[in-house]
Image: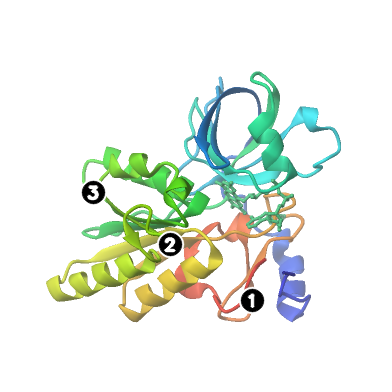
Amino acid sequence: MGLTWRPDRAYLTGLAVAGTRKPVSTRAMHTLPLAQRDDLGNGYYVLWFDSPAPVAASAGQFTMVRSAEWGVAPLLPRPMSLLSGGSRPSMLIKVVGEGTRRMAEDPMGQPYNLLAPLGHAWTPLPEGHRPVLVAGGVGVAPLVYLAEELSAAPDALAPISLYGGRTTRDLPLAERLEACGELAVTTEDGSRGRAGRVTLLLDELLAKAAGSGDKLAVYTCGPHGMMRAVAERAEAAGVWCRASLEAPMGCGYGVCLGCPVAKRDGSYFYTCVDGPCVDAKQVDWTKEVF
Ligand SMILES: Cc1cc2nc3c(=O)[nH]c(=O)nc-3n(C[C@H](O)[C@H](O)[C@H](O)COP(=O)(O)OP(=O)(O)OC[C@H]3O[C@@H](n4cnc5c(N)ncnc54)[C@H](O)[C@@H]3O)c2cc1C
Ligand code: FES
């Protein structure tokens, strides 16, 4: 599937203003040895690094990552959500191509370059709202980070996590969500939780909240189609919703303009600097990214 955007007027305006965008985070290049890799099965791994200079990240931010030992292929670093920051940065990966295959196989101690933290973190939880985290696939990573931040915050209500996967083997880190609050899961084959898509759980929760008057704040990350369905339901219910966007990335900090996602007003988010975490109402979800 190709990109659907074209270099129209809004894109060219984006080129003109790119140089004027302010940096959104205190990014730094961290060269760190691969310290630990947890095999979660079915092509999912968590990579851990030890960082003498802490990575000053918040949930929702990401890193551009590549090993110095990769030579020229793959040439570009890969964008990965941070699963944690500080002195023990980590990320959840799913093997889909050459870069992630190498991450799954490189020996311990191999040096990696992490440009981090990048992008906008999740917007803070509005006061008095219950956080609802809707995750699909590896989109769970920035939501686990958020759930762990929320459970450490003294005043935040415990999150309700709704997590969908194809099978029970596609729900990595479910137990970390569960440790932070309530968790309900769906699988398409019915091998764990309810059979079907995660939006069926969201529909039930939104209907319940409408009856009780509870104020919900939805955070979502996962495949585009899932986030679109979540955003549409939240908007129809008048519920606050933030989404973490995905787009192909070359640089990760606003220079290559390779990461546009269409907005409803006809302009674009440049995902690395305007996102990845954005107000779901501003996204034109009808336009596919990949
Ligand atoms: C902000 C952001 C955060 C991300 N966080 C994570 C994460 O926490 N864990 C994780 O595993 N992945 C994450 N991704 C996706 C990850 O960057 C890609 O899976 C990775 O770049 C693939 O590299 P590769 O060399 O293995 O595959 P490639 O050889 O580059 O691609 C293999 C296949 O995957 C497709 N692909 C590549 N990138 C993406 C993408 N971003 N979304 C959908 N399909 C893609 C390609 O079109 C191709 O079909 C994130 C992407 C972004 C933009
Ligand atoms: S501008 Fe280069 S990845 Fe966003």
Q: Does residue 15 sit above or below 136 in this rendering?
A: below
For residue 111, which quarter of the picture? Answer: top right
Q: Nearer the viewer, mark 2 or mark 1?
A: 2
Disc 2 secondary structure class: loop
Q: Does residue 163 sit above or below 38 in this rendering?
A: below
For marks 3 and 1, the one nearer the N-term is: 3
**Disc 3 CB within 8 Å of nearest ligand 1 atom:** no
Q: Which residue is mark 1?
A: 267
Q: Which mark is residue 188?
A: 2
Disc 1 secondary structure class: loop
Relative to 274, 147 lies left or right: left
Q: Residue furthest left?
A: 212
For marks 2 and 3, the one nearer the N-term is: 3
For marks 2 and 1, the one nearer the N-term is: 2
Amino acid type of the residue tagged 2 in the rendering: Glu
Q: Where's residue 64, x and y in %? A: 66, 42
Amino acid type of the residue tagged 3 in the rendering: Ala
Q: Nearer the viewer, mark 3 or mark 1?
A: 3
Q: Where's residue 189, x and y in %? A: 42, 60
**Circle 3 Cα neighbour tier, 10 Å, few/some/many (<14 / 14–19 / ≥20):** some
Q: Residue furthest right?
A: 72
For residue 201, which quarter of the picture? Answer: bottom left
Q: Residue at x 74, y 61 (%)?
A: 257
Relative to 72, 146 lies left or right: left
**Circle 1 Cα neighbour tier, 10 Å, few/some/many (<14 / 14–19 / ≥20):** some
Q: Considering the image in quadrants, where does the C terminus appear? A: bottom right
Q: Are marks 2 and 1 in contact (CB under 8 Å)?
A: no
The answer for how far apart the CA atoms under marks 2 and 3 are is 27 Å
Q: Which residue is mark 3?
A: 158
Amino acid type of the residue tagged 1 in the rendering: Ser
